[in-house]
Amino acid sequence: MSGGVQFPVRVIETEALSPTVKRLRLARRDGQALPPYSAGAHTVLTLDGGARLIRNAYSLLGSTRAGGAAYEVAVLRNPQSRGGSAFIHDHLSVGTDLNLSAPINLFPLNRTARRHILVAGGIGITPIAAMASELAALALPFELHYAMRDIASGAFAAELAAQHGDRLHLYVSERQERLSVRDILAHQPLGTHLYVCGPERMIEGVMADARVAGWPESALHAERFLAPEGGEPFALRLARSGISTVVAQHETLLEAIEAAGVDAPYLCRGGACGQCETRVLVADGELLHADHYLTDSQKSCGDTIMTCVSRLRGRELVLDL
């Protein structure tokens, strides 16, 4: 089943956290509580954009350990938005109705860790801030490292400083402050776990430094929700459904499948979870794999594709759907 259970919700509060980040508070329209979730979880918002439905995944702020009837997300206005972030910033206000999915956590805290190192860049602070709050409530040892371009763009910086004091370390690029992961990782006790979320280059750099320092893969955790890139249009045929359509320049495979009326599986819509993996029957062209789920050998075989972020450079793609 695509996306799992959906809940009709309403925007009950909005707040500009910075010139480019907007926080939404969402509650069920029938007044009942939404499902519980832990820090690191995300939900998929379904927005009615008029010409098409927009479905994007967003990390949930905080957690529901202490209960609560509403969810909160923070959304960065992306200059390269394909519609989602711009629509939220320009059109969502108090009273707007939309749907959201049941939460899923692909980026959970390891409760057996001896210590937790949290690293965030930009809007990647959303799941990391939730982790910090949960760890503080559980009285578990952690430190939080948050890199930003400038103070104005640092959503949550003041709030996090008030909550976590000297456990928070800020790095502001315009002040020539640089986050040195090697220094952070040095002399950490055995059993420490590292969590990172932010721009792709930052994640890759942090993970590379940790591996060079000898950290085991089991102690390294990263969250990547990829923004799918566009490309040249191509023909798409869904063999089992008997449907032929076209994947447009700024449309994902998954969006084209959904627009054709086929209920295709997904969870993260960002190339991380593997739920949308679909068997390729024919690829008249080159498969452009953009996910972080398939191995390099699986990608080179070309037997399957992640429909949420990957596409074809060529004439026609035939899928087992």
Image (cartoon, helix red, strand yellow):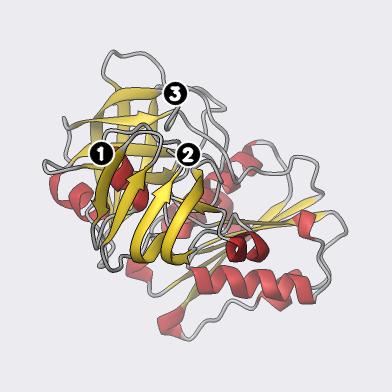
Name the quadrant containing residue 145.
Answer: bottom right
Decide: few, some or many residues near mark 1? Use Cα within 10 Å; few <14, some 14-19, many ≥20. some
Amino acid type at mark 1: Ala
Q: Nearer the viewer, residue 18 or 58?
A: 58
The earlier-in-sequence mark between 2 and 1 is 1
Look at the image and tell me in which quarter the C terminus lies. top left
Q: Residue at x 82, y 49 (%)?
A: 114
Residue underneath mark 3: 68
Which dot marks residue 267? 2
Residue underneath mark 1: 260
> For the residues marked 3 and 2, what is the alpha-carbon distance in whole angstroms?
24 Å
SS of the residue under disc 2: loop
Residue 147 screen position, x and y as percent: 50, 70
Q: Nearer the viewer, residue 98 or 164?
A: 98
Residue 162 in view: no
Residue 227 screen position, x and y as percent: 38, 60
Residue 15 in view: yes
The earlier-in-sequence mark between 1 and 3 is 3
Residue 150 screen position, x and y as percent: 38, 74
